[in-house]
Image (cartoon, rainbow, N blue to C red):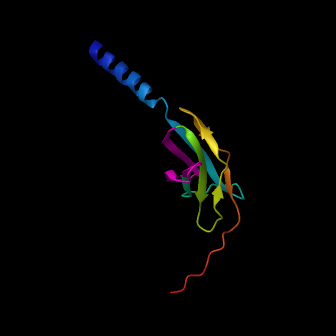
Amino acid sequence: MKSFFTLVIGVMLSYGVFAQGVGIVRGTVIDEDDTALPFATVILLSAETDELVKAGYTNDDGEFILTPLSSGKYKVKVTYTSRADYLTDEFILTEGEEKVLESIRLGGDAELEEVKI
């Protein structure tokens, strides 16, 4: 029993060591009526190179979480069908930080071009 307890404590401590330095970016995507937008595409870009770092989707409540992330300068781009894209200002994520963005409001309809076949 004592060795099992020691093993559990060892695993918990090692998890804490590996978890250090992991950054998180989270937020919520809503429309102009404050309604959550599920399945919006959320793209984390390097602010310096505009390269894709990580991407994901919002859940049914319009919430997203992007992790694990290293420290750096980033910006978030959000896209949603029939809505204009949104790009945040750049921000700095430090080691181990959880960055909570203000609600991202997607307004107005994007102009869709007609497709001819």
Find out whether residue 7 is within the magenta segment: no
Residue 99 horizontal side relative to residue 15, left or right: right
Residue 18, by quadrant, is top left
Residue at image position (54%, 32%) is: 95
Q: How far across and how far down the image is residue 21, in percent?
A: 49, 31
Placement of 65 over or under 86, stated as above or below: above
Q: In which quarter of the image is the N terminus?
A: top left
Count the numbered circles shown.
Answer: 0
Which of the pair 54/46 is nearer the observer?
46
Return the residue found at the far front: 49
> Which residue lies at the image location 57% right of the left edge and 34% below the top edge?
94
On the rendered structure, is 114 left or right of 105?
left
Provide residue 8's location: percent of width, then percent of height.
34, 21
The foreground one among 63 and 67 is: 67
| Identity of the residue drawn at 64% across and 55% down | 87
Examine the structure image and report whether residue 60 is included in the region drawn in magenta: yes
Q: Which of 60 and 105 is in front in this view?
A: 105
Residue 80 visible, this orientation:
yes
Percent position of residue 81, x then y: 58, 66
Residue 35 is at least partly visible in this image: no
Outermost residue, top direction? 2
Where, by quadrant of the figure, is residue 35 drawn?
A: bottom right
Name the residue furthest bottom. Answer: 117
Residue 24 x %, y %:
54, 39
Judge whether 109 appears above or below 98 on screen. Answer: below
The magenta region covers: 44-70
106 relative to 57 in the view: left or right: right
